[in-house]
Amino acid sequence: MRFFVDVAGMQVGPRQLFGVGGYWLYLGGRPVMHLIAAGGAVSDDQPNATRIDHVALRIDDAAEWSALLGRLDCHGYAYQLAEVPLARERQLFVRLAPGVVVEFVTARF
């Protein structure tokens, strides 16, 4: 949750009480991502499996892309950059935990 608030610029917002802890994260006053606390096995075959591989978020503004890079550096997150020449896009990957990656995508400015 801290990554999405401190780096991605989301805000923690209202969330109904469920039987498990978690957060609704908001952008522009709208709920955009629901995080739940890890607990219990995903399946009998994969007791330690994550429920996601990665999440991709698009940034359409050059100033916001630069601000994201600054926040990543300020908070000490390592990241990898990649170019997608045919799509004329840039990708940025941050590994938050084993098996959990956040991708940010933007047009090449």
Image: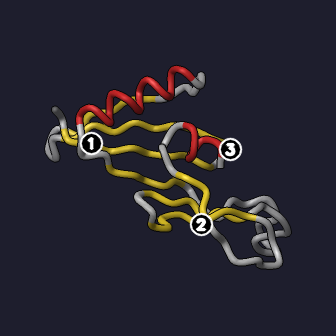
The residue labelled by disc 3 is 98
Q: Residue at x 23, y 34 (%)?
A: 62
Could you say which disc has been placed on residue 106 in the image? 1
Between the C-alphas of marks 1 and 2, the distance is 23 Å
Q: Residue at x 85, y 69 (%)?
A: 40
Between the C-alphas of marks 3 and 2, the distance is 19 Å
Q: Residue at x 48, y 44 (%)?
A: 9
Q: Earlier in the sequence, mark 1 or mark 2?
A: 2
SS class, disc 1: strand
The residue labelled by disc 2 is 34
Residue 7 pos. (x, y %): 52, 37
Q: Residue at x 50, y 46 (%)?
A: 102
Between the C-alphas of marks 3 and 1, the distance is 25 Å
User: Identity of the amino acid at label 2?
Assistant: His
Residue 90 pos. (x, y %): 27, 37
Crowdedness of circle 2 by 10 Å Cα count: few (<14), some, many (20+)?
A: few
Q: Earlier in the sequence, mark 3 or mark 2?
A: 2
Residue 72 pos. (x, y %): 50, 28
Crowdedness of circle 1 by 10 Å Cα count: few (<14), some, many (20+)?
A: some
104 vs 48, left or right, is left
Name the quarter where the C terminus is drawn: top left
User: Identity of the amino acid at label 3?
Assistant: Pro
User: Identity of the amino acid at label 1?
Assistant: Thr
- In this rendered view, identify the residue nearer to me: 90 or 25: 25
Q: Nearer the viewer, mark 1 or mark 2?
A: 2
Q: Earlier in the sequence, mark 3 or mark 1?
A: 3
Residue 36 pos. (x, y %): 70, 65
